[in-house]
Image: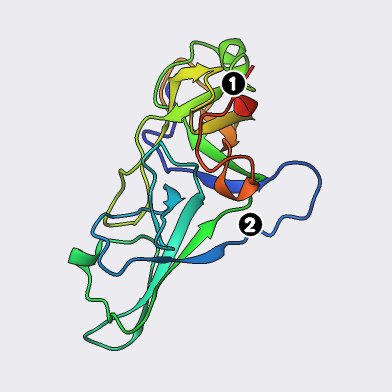
Amino acid sequence: MANNLAGGYGLRPIGITGAGANTTGTTQYEIANDYTTAIYQGGIVIPLAGGTIAISDQAVAPLGVFYGVEFVDSGTKKTTWKNYWPGSNNVSVDTNYPVKAFVFDNPMQLYTVVADGTNTDRATALADVFANCDMASVNNGSTNTGQSTDMIDISTAATTAGLDLRIVGLYEDEGNVDYSALGHQYIVRLNAPFNSGFAAAVGTAANTGI
C-alpha cells in the first residue's frame, strides 16, 4: 500500500509540547535585501551575526521555520506578500524598506514532517521516537506554490546530538500510514533551537537522543 503523499512539505506547525495555549504564531525578523538564496515556506532558518536570517546550513542552531515574507516592490511601490522568499535576484525590492520575514520560532513548537523513505513497519517507526534526526535536504521547494518540499532523512535517526530534529511522535492519518514507503509522517521539534537559550550552536551533549 502506497501513501497519498508523494513528497515533502517541509515542517508544518501543529501545536506545542504540553498543555499550554498555542496560537501557532510567528515572530518578525529580517532578510537582507541582497540575500539571493530562496527560502521556502516550511524551511528551517538560522540567525546571522548581521541581525538577519538565512536558510539553515545544518551547523548553526535553528531559529525556527519560515512562514512568509513581506517587502515593498521597487516598481509598484506597493507592499508585497509572498509565502516564500524568491531571492533578491528574482524580485524587485525597494531597499528603503526592510524585508520582513515571519518565522515560527517558539522553542516548544511541534511540527509534522514527511519521511523520505521506508521505516519498514509501525513498530520500527515507533522505536525512532525520542531519537534525533536530520533533514534529507534543507532548501528544496516549488516556485509555483512557495512551499518547501524538504523531508526528514529517517535513515539518520540516532542518539547523535548534532542532528536538526528531535522525533517526538508518529503523525498518522488514514492515507499515509504505510511505513514501508515514502510519505509516512512524524511529529518533531527543532533540536536545541536558538531561542531556547541552551546553545548557540547544535551539537551539545544535553541534546542527545535516546
Q: Name the side, left or right, on which 21 lies relative to 60.
A: right
Residue under label 1:
131
First in sequence: mark 2 or mark 1? 2
Image location (x, y in percent) of residue 101: 44, 65
Q: Nearer the viewer, residue 50 or 157?
A: 50
Coloured how?
rainbow
With respect to residue 8, does 106 lie above or below?
A: below
Instruction: Name the amino acid type tagged 2.
Output: Thr
Q: Which mark is residue 115?
A: none
- In the rendered image, residue 102, in percent from the top left (x then y), is placed at 49, 64
- Residue type (three-letter) at the residue carrying disc 1: Ala
* Quadrant assignment for the N terminus: top left
* As drawn, 145 above or below 140: below
Q: Which residue was labeled with disc 2? A: 24
Q: Examine the rendered structure and indicate whether residue 15 appears above or below residue 2.
A: below
> Where does the image place residue 84, in percent across and percent down from the top left?
36, 60
Quadrant of residue 90 within the rendered picture: bottom left
Near-viewer residue (205 or 160): 205
- Total numbered badges shown on the rendered structure: 2
Residue drawn at x 43%, y 50% as measured from the top left: 45
Query: Looking at the rendering, in which quadrant would you find the C terminus?
Result: top right
